[in-house]
Amino acid sequence: MTELKIPNHIAIILDGNGRWAKKQNRPRTFGHKEGAENVIRIARSAKKFGVKTLTLYAFSTENWKRPASEVGFLMDLLIKFVNSKIDELMEEDCKLNFLGDITKLPKKTKEACEFALDKTKDNKSLVINIALNYGGRDELVHSFKEIMKKGYGSDEITEELISDNLYTSGQADPDLLIRPGGELRLSNFLVYQLAYTELYFTEVLWPDFTEDDLREAIVAFTKRDRRYGGL
Ligand code: IPE
Ligand code: IPE
Ligand code: MG
């Protein structure tokens, strides 16, 4: 077999938790819990493969439309995730980062995010961006507001300037996007950054997504011919 081409940056839409739970006659929240466990497993696998950045879509600006009980559960789960996984994240030398407006999160969830940010800030082996209260369109609005605040004139607006004012400022765009859960759409994820990203969709539900599934996605990526409009 040809050698695997390892994407530097993989983005994943963490989808299918609810359906995974329903298949076993369990409440949707059970699927979210298992989905959170899988984050650590896949982060470890990604690091093993040599991936440098993992961007995970955990809660969208549209997910606030869900019943308050589910939203509340997810906000609490995040606190539990940070508290129970922080030691593992430190051992694995993972740096956590959040994409999205975390100031709009419940106070305790926001504080858990800030704690994780500070605690892992010097780690180097793998950057994990968690997209939380994140929307691609919201991010563009945020970028344009930042640019206006900094006083740039219309002649100074460049693709690079827009990119530098996104939540992903300073990071390279994803090489590979993986969407488990069977839906064939982006659901407002990284709309600017995915312009030339290779897309990979699978029916596997996120809590069932394993290191082998990740390998399969990387094998597919290895076979892609990235032309960027050239020949
Ligand atoms: C993804 O799983 C997690 C979040 C969006 C928070 P879903 O909750 O969307 O699961 P399905 O798509 O209903 O199965
Ligand atoms: C996308 O999943 C958002 C996250 C996984 C965080 P959704 O389940 O919200 O997407 P739609 O509603 O099916 O497009
Ligand atoms: Mg879903």
Image (spheres, grey):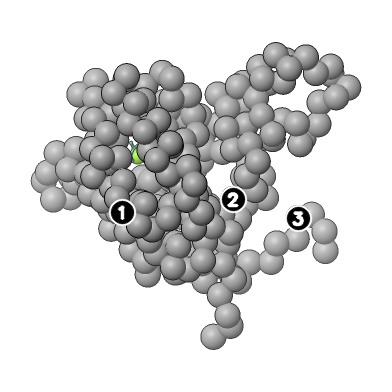
The answer as to whether callout 3 falls within 8 Å of ligand 2 is: no
Q: How many angstroms separate mark 3 from mark 1 (CA)?
A: 38 Å
Q: How many angstroms separate mark 3 from mark 2 (CA)?
A: 14 Å
Identify the secondary structure beneath mark 3: loop
Which residue is at 75% across, 60% downward? Answer: 227
Identify the secondary structure beneath mark 2: loop
3 and 1 marks in contact (CB < 8 Å): no
The residue lying toward the viewer, choosing from 171 and 227, is 171
Which residue is at 22% across, 49% downward? Answer: 34
Q: Residues within 10 Å of mark 2 (few under 14, many from 20)?
A: many
Q: Which residue is mark 2?
A: 174
Residue farthest to the left? Answer: 25
Could you tell me residue 117's position as x and y percent? 43, 37
Q: How many angstroms separate mark 1 from mark 2 (CA)?
A: 25 Å
Which residue is at 52% across, 61% downward? Answer: 51
* Amino acid at circle 1: Glu
* Amino acid at circle 2: Pro
In the image, residue 67 sits, relative to residue 161, either above or below, namely above
Q: Which mark is residue 88?
A: 1
Could you tell me residue 154's position as x and y percent? 84, 18
Q: Which residue is mark 3?
A: 228
In the image, residue 212 sits, relative to residue 3, either above or below, namely above
Q: Quadrant of the N terminus?
A: bottom right
